[in-house]
Image (cartoon, rainbow, N blue to C red):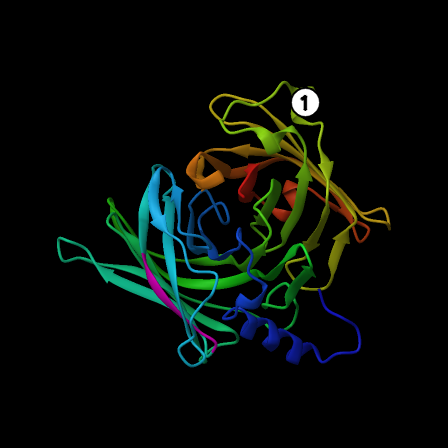
Amino acid sequence: MVETGIDIKQHQQGGFDLIWQRFPERNIRSSSVWWYIMLMPEQAEGYGPKQAMFSLIAMAGDSFQVNKVKHPGYDRQITLDGDEELLNTVALGWYFDGQTKHRNLVHEDFPSVLSPRGSVMGWKETEDGKRVGGGFTAYGDRPFGIRGEFVGSNGGTRFEAWGDPNSDSTSPGFIYDYDYKVGGFHIVSWRHLRFAGEITSPNGTEEVQGIGYFQRVCFNVPLFPWKWIWTSFADGSFFSCTIPYAGLQLLRRGDRFYPDILERATLPVIRGGFFHWADGSKETMFSKSTVTPTAGDPYPSFAVECFSDAGDYIRFDVVPYSHLQYLLNRPILGGRADSCFNYNEFPFRVANLEGVIDGRVINRQVLGDGFGNCEYTWGLFL
């Protein structure tokens, strides 16, 4: 979110520099920090159905679980070594290769060094002598260049990614900073980037290139439910909306959906969104967004609608073709109970697209095929 009256290039560079910071002085018991990138390789239909996600996460506290695997947290009172930090981290990665869902390409914990000079990276050697780990580093050959590498027991990735300084959407220039006495969060969103590299799965190593989304999030509040949509169209246009919400889903621990009337009875905390034309001519901001889930077999569906104050709108159906899930647990009450957060990702194809933006009708014939990722989370991670 760019303030008026400031130098745009300086603002974007400031956003890039913030990727390598996490504000330890704001830590509370339930703090966490996430670096993650979504990769959407270019294909015959556009940027799908292949899709991958790689994450590096660190959680405050003694320990936590991801899909029932126990991992160490980090001490709230971080001991600094100069201007670098040593954090216990967990690397996660999955890949849908167009046919097969590779759930656990990477699932490793190891200490990582976070350096404000432009890196968050760590490695360890397994009992069988394999080197696993990964993270992100900055490099200066392209605008906002980063290199990523993740290596796990079942595969991984190596890539270079870069941006375009012509807009905040194509650079790390979208920054949220909410810091209150009771907690808050700090987000750097790089909402559209280019990448080239390789992804390795049990089916082999594949050279890929395309577009992606990168974010660094510092949560200094308990993780709470949200819905998030990110969509790219074949012509290069892209769309996103984010809806943190409150509802009975705060109490849900399993996967079973409530009846529709209860599933949809939620109170949005924020419900903004945007659409960015492929030619970069204009970015349209939406003031009202809804993402309505409907239970289905094998995957739920979601109806997306967004409206701007000027009368622009976009609506489409999310039709998932895969599902990836991370269940996060952490002990509370001295180990007598645990909190649970259910994080779900649904790679999807766009259906029934329609809208009017900047006076221009949009549909599949105009934008081409659309693919994306839908996050639907519930629970409360204390």
Q: Where 43 falls versus 179 (above or below)?
A: above
Residue at the extreme top of the image, as rendered: 259
Question: Which image quadrant is residue 336 in?
Answer: top left
Q: Name the residue under label 1.
A: 262
278 or 238: nearer the viewer: 238
Q: For mark 1, give the secondary structure.
A: helix
118 or 236: nearer the viewer: 118
Left or right of 14 in this view: 1: right
- Residue at 79% over, 49% down: 287
- Residue at 69% over, 77% down: 8
- Residue at 13% over, 53% down: 128
Left or right of 150 in this view: 251: right
| Residue type for callout 1 | Leu
Q: What stretch is highlighted in magenta?
A: 110-116
215 or 84: nearer the viewer: 84
182 or 102: nearer the viewer: 182
Q: Does the magenta stretch include residue 120?
A: no
Left or right of 219 in this view: 289: right
Residue 17: horizontal and vertical position, in percent? 54, 75
On the question of residue 190 being in view, the answer is yes
